[in-house]
Amino acid sequence: MRKPSGRFWSDYAFRTRVFAILAAIINLINVGANIAAAVAYASMWYGSMAIYYFALGALRTGMLTANRQIGRRFEEKRQGKAKLKMYLACGISLVVFETALIYAVAEMVTEKITSTGEIMAIAIAAYTFYKVILAIVNVKKTGKLHDPSLQCLRNINLTDALVSVMSLQVTMIAVFGTSGELTTLTHVMGIVITVLTMAIAVIMIIQAAKRLKENSYEEGR
């Protein structure tokens, strides 16, 4: 069977950025759905998730724009350092977002989540599975490329997928489960997801700071 040709199929970095743009568009639809649910059910949980997803989408778009500007403004030798600074900024931004996520989790704990119906639950499930699969594929492939800009997009997608798993669980239990299950499972999942996403952000900051220090040392030699 003949393999597809063209830059999209041969250039993984280009393909990753195309998928990141598509993810940003789909994310806006997801934000709209959460806003609609927040208004329809007077829910602070769906409102806080809409804000979180919007912020994450804005960060993804900002990183794509920054990467494009780096390619235009810097020569190849200076692009590596600029991308490391972008990676550091991404990690710091994620720390801020995950701190805000604590508020969303607190709302989830205290609020009785209203059922949004089976159709929305199925839609959220399909969207979540798509993001989880994409995140896993990106983790495997970008680890081999050592490109900070791609690793930044990978970690944003991974964070997005983890939070979506939590959101899916809340929705599924609200539709199909009982209040007892909601109280127990959701609390545990909320804490686990918050710790994992915060860990990703902190590791990014440590990695970026270490690599920038090594870069500065090599330049000073």
Image (cartoon, rainbow, N blue to C red):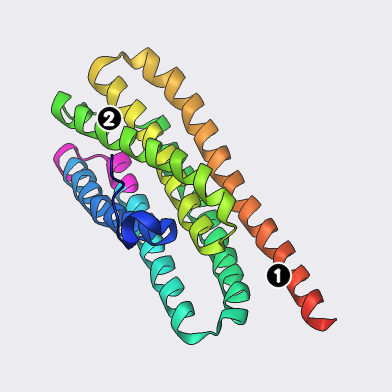
Looking at the picture, tell me which residue is in the foreground, 54 or 61: 61
In magenta segment, residue 209:
no
Assess disc 1: are there few (<14), some (14-19) or many (≥20) residues with their C-alpha within 10 Å of its C-alpha. Answer: some
Toward the viewer: 1 or 185? 1
Is 31 positioned to the left or the right of 196 in the image?
left
Name the residue that disc number 1 marks: 212
Q: Main secondary structure of the magenta part?
A: helix
In the rendered structure, find residue 186 and report the number of the disc placed on it.
Answer: none
Left or right of 172, for residue 40? left
Residue at (42, 56) in percent of width and height: 12
x, y percentage for residue 42? Answer: 20, 40
Query: What is the spatial separation of the Cα atoms under label 2 and label 1, in whole angstroms?
Result: 40 Å
The residue stretch that appears in magenta: 39-49
- Residue at 52% x, 39% y is 194
- Residue 45 magenta-highlighted: yes
- Residue 119 rendering spot, x and y as whole percentages: 14, 28
- Look at the picture and state if 203 lies above or below 175: below
- Disc 1 marks a residue whose amino acid type is Leu
Quarter of the image for the C terminus: give it.
bottom right
- The disc, 2 or 1, on the residue closer to the chain's N-terminal end is 2
- Which residue is situated farthest in the right direction here? 221
The part of the image, by quadrant, that contains residue 1 is top left
Amino acid type at image mark 2: Ala
- Location of mark 2 (residue): 125
The residue at 55%/85% (across/down) is 75
